[in-house]
Image (cartoon, grey):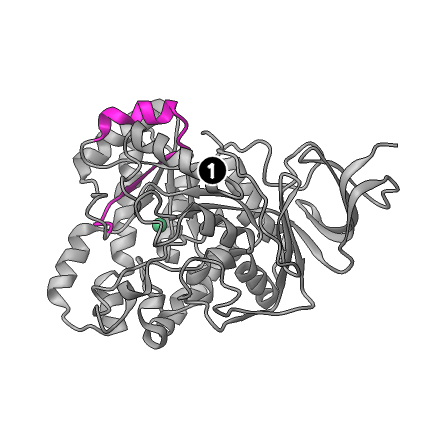
Amino acid sequence: MEHFDTIIKNGNVVLPTGVRKLDIGVTNGKFSAVEKDLQNKADRVIHADNHYIFPGAIDIHVHFNEPGHEDWEGFHTGSAMLGAGGCTTYFDMPLNGIPSTVTVDALKQKAEIAENKSLIDFGLWGGLVPGNLEEIHHLAQKGVIGFKAFLSPSGNEAFEHVDDAILLKGMKRIAETGKILALHSESTAIIKFLEGEITGDDAASFAATRPIEAEAEAVQRALSFAKITNCPLHFVHISSAQSVQIITKAKQQGMDVTLETCPHYLLCTMSDLETKGAAAKCAPPLRDERENRRLIESLLEDKIDMITSDHSPCPPELKDPANFSLRKAWGGINGGQFTLLSMIELAIKHDIPFERIAKWTASNPAKRFHLADKGEIRVGMDADLAIISLDQAHTVTAENLFSRHKQSLYMDHTFPCRIIGTINRGTPIYQADKDTKNTGKGKWLRG
Ligand SMILES: [Zn+2]
């Protein structure tokens, strides 16, 4: 009888077709059996009675800021933090490190660091910025997972946004490589105009400078450009049902386009920005309750392809009201650890079957970015999984927040579930009840 490295006994396994009580065998980092009552012997047996086994989450949108800003996060703390949240694969964005990932040299530099430090598997985005059109093909050959561009200022002068002319040229080149262009879509013209018109520094004034119209206009324009250039698109952190609707229409017309939203747009509203200040500041901003409900409806209607964290932390000084007004404070949410927990909270609240959560957090991102070995608990695929208890709650504290800085929109929040353990390619990289040193060794998934 075949001997397994690991058997996970008697868990509620989240399969694409539903949740079933099964045993899971793991051999050489792959799922080798997913069936009832495995009798085989194994080096390690994990008893998962009453727990839920999700496919390891794939978070295609994080900012780890290394090299150059590892004091903001870094690959080691960042990947350990994601692992503690049930995530086994992530894609690091091309900005907020130094240098930005807009040349092959910068890509190689980042890949070397990440290969040494990341505890879980990862992909790397390249950037499309003014001045790097000549690098697009080289970056694609060297394995970027796709390209990212901003249609409005990124808040980081070292990663400039593209104007319409560069966007069109960049799309043409990216289409030639067969890769996907991920877009931060807000209209520069609308934001700049409103920043001149609106003077207040409260939460409502900040939100009013970045209205839904600014997002919808940029989304519509990008789709028009993609029609002309045949460039595959992915819209990051979509915050409004109006934008979802525009993208849904484009999909119905046969365009190659997907979108993500983030847990903070689903679980939080502008009132969190009012009460928590800059810890809840992001762009696009958190929306009001009505819009929040409409976005959840869009998700329930299956119009949103995937959920990402857009984990974008900074040192707390950059969000300290003693140093910066709300308008000037760093925009970005420290939330990478809580994507799966947030989505399970949402599932419980709205009666969403867990297989849909697994689709948004694992199988859809795997399919979109051609990770053939990932995204599902299935024999032959990478043994990436998260073991979750619904019998235990998880309250976020400075002690159990694993990102480098202990400031988060989710601080003191209680999730109705808890990550018990996370396994990446067969290796346990997080165990809630053990203070073990992480031993995982992440692999670069070249695109
Ligand atoms: Zn981002």
- On screen, 36 above or below 320? above
Between residues 348 and 293, which one lies in front from this camera angle? 348
Which region of the structure is painted magenta? 132-154
Specify whether 133 is left or right of 346: left
Between residues 32 and 225, which one lies in front from this camera angle? 32
- Residue 202: give x, y in percent of width and height: 24, 74
- Residue 397: give x, y in percent of width and height: 50, 70
In the image, residue 152 lies in the stretch drawn in magenta: yes
Q: Quadrant of residue 440?
A: top right
Q: Which residue is mark 1?
A: 116
Disc 1 CB within 8 Å of nearest ligand 1 atom: no
- Residue 254: give x, y in percent of width and height: 42, 34
Specify whether 306 is left or right of 47: left
Work out which quarter of the rendered image holds the N terminus and state it: top right
- Residue 423: give x, y in percent of width and height: 63, 46
Residue shown at 21% from the left, 44% from the top:
158
As helix, strand or loop, the secondary structure at mark 1 comes to helix
Q: Residues within 10 Å of mark 1 (few under 14, many from 20)?
A: few
Specify whether 41 is left or right of 55: right
